[in-house]
Image (cartoon, rainbow, N blue to C red):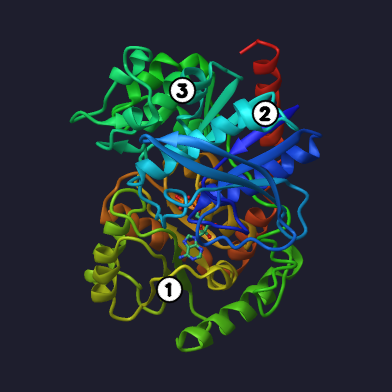
């Protein structure tokens, strides 16, 4: 089938978090299922075009009564045969963004550009189905229907319901769509906001999210972020499909960022060598003691940073005779709090891909105290590197970690439960035989994309043939 996969980020060009990984690895896996899949993404100012990239379309869109020129570039990432269409527009799409959902104009314009291209300008290639990802491109079905009178089948994947594009910017007025012609525009979220994700949930033909547990959770008040009633009403068209991991990146046997590559057979020596190198590069004493890590976004809502700060402040982290390294960036105030709370820990607040790989390889365990986690890739990568996840039993963490076999899970969002799980993990790792057994268990888990790509493929086929 011809599939258009729309996403705000894609690893290798521009990445803020897990969506960038999924938007690269799922399409790569679908290519192997013989789909003609192509990506559509914004030409963010951080992405540089090269001579090899070719201009495939140019046209104008109208937004806020202005005519805006749009160019569409075809780019391939080195070593990949996945076609990526990058949408260039100077006024809105060239704006810098962050991981928040505060950029309503940019993503209304992105959705309009993609919709206009699909409906009128991609004469050389027409998708059978459009796969939307998160709020950034969730308006595409609505725009296609109301501005272009065109409704190809559409699937919306919710990667994180906490980010909805809830806004006071009058985007629908700027798009030229009124509630008279599109009554769902009267649906608002409190206090009286327009909401990109909500419009996607209402207009897409099918919905998926990134783990079976999160698919159930988002239909409850606790996790539904105010959209639970809309999601409940669509439960027959909602499926949870777990994310996989790249089969070319995050491979400890061939990871170029490590001082020593390793496999399941050489895990002990490999992790020891990587731990020593990491301790040295971080300025920590080079010692054979447990090294605890954290990798992830610094946000006040999801990642359990409150628990980490609490543990640092109370002197519980790092526990005696262990070391702790934190790598994460995001909310500047929380970053400052982390720095202020840490006494004997290493806190690094920047995005650093090589260092992340070195922590996955060199740490003994990784803390993932998220209050909710749609899927989570951190725990999958950690397990691939034989690093024990100590994680909250929620969403994809609950679906992918086997308690006491491939990680330690805790249920309550309290410092006591978190610390008790960490101490349990350290106790398991302190027995060399048990430790090796756990490492081998973790490294033999299959987190390849193939089974999930097959599930997506079945949904596409059913939608296309009208079964869903
Ligand atoms: P989310 O998408 O909610 O941020 P995920 O667990 O799905 O969380 O994915 C996070 C991805 O981003 C992983 O690939 C992780 O290694 C990477 N990552 C997060 N923070 C950093 C950082 N500061 N430096 C390097 N990589 C990071």
Q: Pointer 3: residues within 10 angstroms few (<14), some, or many (20+)?
A: many
* Residue nearest the viewer, comparing 226 with 136: 136
Q: What element carries label 3?
A: helix
| Rendered image: mark on residue 142 | 3
Q: Eyeballing the image, is 151 above or below 246?
A: above
* Residue nearest the viewer, comparing 297 with 268: 297
Answer with left or right where residue 316 lies relative to residue 240: left
Residue 350, given in percent of the width and then of the height, sits at 42, 70
In terms of image quadrants, where is residue 51? bottom right
Decide which of tag 2 and tag 3 comes sooner along the chain: 3
Q: Is residue 258 visible?
A: yes
What residue sits right under mark 1 in the picture? 325
Q: Nearer the viewer, mark 1 or mark 3?
A: 3
Marks 2 and 1, how far apart at CA: 37 Å
Q: Residue at x 42, y 19 (%)?
A: 202
Residue 428, given in percent of the width and then of the height, sits at 50, 62
Decide which of tag 2 and tag 1 comes sooner along the chain: 1
Q: Pointer 1: residues within 10 angstroms few (<14), some, or many (20+)?
A: many
Q: Is mark 2 on a helix, strand or loop?
A: helix
Quadrant location of the C terminus in the rendered image: top right
Marks 1 and 3, how far apart at CA: 45 Å
Q: Residue at x 57, y 83 (%)?
A: 276
What residue sits right under mark 2 in the picture? 455
Q: Eyeballing the image, is 177 above or below 248?
A: above
Q: Pointer 2: residues within 10 angstroms few (<14), some, or many (20+)?
A: some
């Amino acid at each position: 089938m011809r599939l258009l996969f729309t996403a705000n980020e894609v690893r290798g060009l521009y990445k803020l978090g897990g969506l960038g990984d999924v938007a690269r690895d799922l399409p790569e896996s679908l290519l192997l299922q013989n789909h003609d899949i192509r990506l559509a993404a914004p030409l963010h100012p951080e992405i540089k075009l090269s001579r090899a990239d070719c201009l495939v379309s140019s046209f104008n869109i109208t937004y806020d009564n202005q005519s805006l020129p749009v160019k569409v570039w075809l780019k391939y990432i080195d070593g990949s045969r996945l076609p990526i269409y990058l949408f260039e527009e100077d006024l809105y799409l060239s704006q810098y963004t962050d991981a928040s959902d505060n950029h309503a104009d940019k993503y209304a314009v992105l959705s309009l550009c993609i919709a206009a291209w699909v409906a009128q300008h991609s004469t050389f290639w027409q998708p059978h189905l459009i796969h939307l990802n998160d709020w950034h491109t969730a308006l595409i079905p609505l725009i296609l229907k109301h501005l272009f009178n065109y409704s190809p089948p559409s699937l919306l994947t919710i990667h994180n319901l906490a980010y909805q594009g809830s806004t006071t910017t009058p985007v629908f007025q700027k798009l030229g769509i009124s509630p008279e012609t599109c009554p769902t525009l009267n649906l608002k979220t409190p206090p009286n906001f327009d909401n990109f994700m909500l419009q996607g949930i209402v207009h897409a033909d099918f919905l998926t999210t990134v783990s079976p547990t999160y698919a159930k959770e988002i239909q409850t008040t606790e996790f539904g972020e105010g959209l639970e009633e809309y999601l409940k009403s669509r439960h027959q068209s909602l499926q949870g499909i777990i994310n996989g991991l790249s089969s070319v990146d995050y491979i400890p046997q061939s990871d170029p960022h490590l001082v020593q590559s390793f496999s399941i057979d050489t895990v002990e020596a490999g992790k020891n060598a990587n731990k020593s190198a990491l301790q040295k590069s971080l300025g920590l004493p080079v010692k054979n003691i447990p090294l605890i890590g954290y990798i992830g976004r610094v946000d006040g809502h999801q990642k359990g940073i409150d628990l980490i700060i609490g543990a640092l402040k109370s002197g519980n982290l790092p526990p005696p005779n262990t070391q702790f390294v934190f790598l994460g960036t995001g909310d500047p105030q929380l970053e400052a709090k982390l720095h202020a709370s840490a006494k004997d820990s290493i806190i690094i607040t920047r995005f650093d891909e090589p260092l992340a790989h070195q922590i996955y390889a060199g740490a003994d365990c990784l803390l993932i105290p998220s209050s909710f986690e749609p899927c989570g890739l951190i725990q999958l990568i950690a397990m691939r590197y034989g690093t024990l996840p100590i994680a909250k039993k929620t969403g994809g963490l609950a679906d992918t970690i086997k308690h006491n076999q491939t990680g330690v899970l805790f249920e309550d969002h309290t410092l006591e439960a978190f610390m008790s799980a960490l101490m349990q993990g350290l106790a398991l790792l302190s027995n060399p035989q048990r430790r090796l057994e756990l490492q081998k268990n973790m490294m033999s888990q299959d987190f390849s994309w193939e089974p999930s790509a097959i599930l997506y493929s079945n949904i596409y086929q059913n939608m296309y043939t009208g079964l869903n």
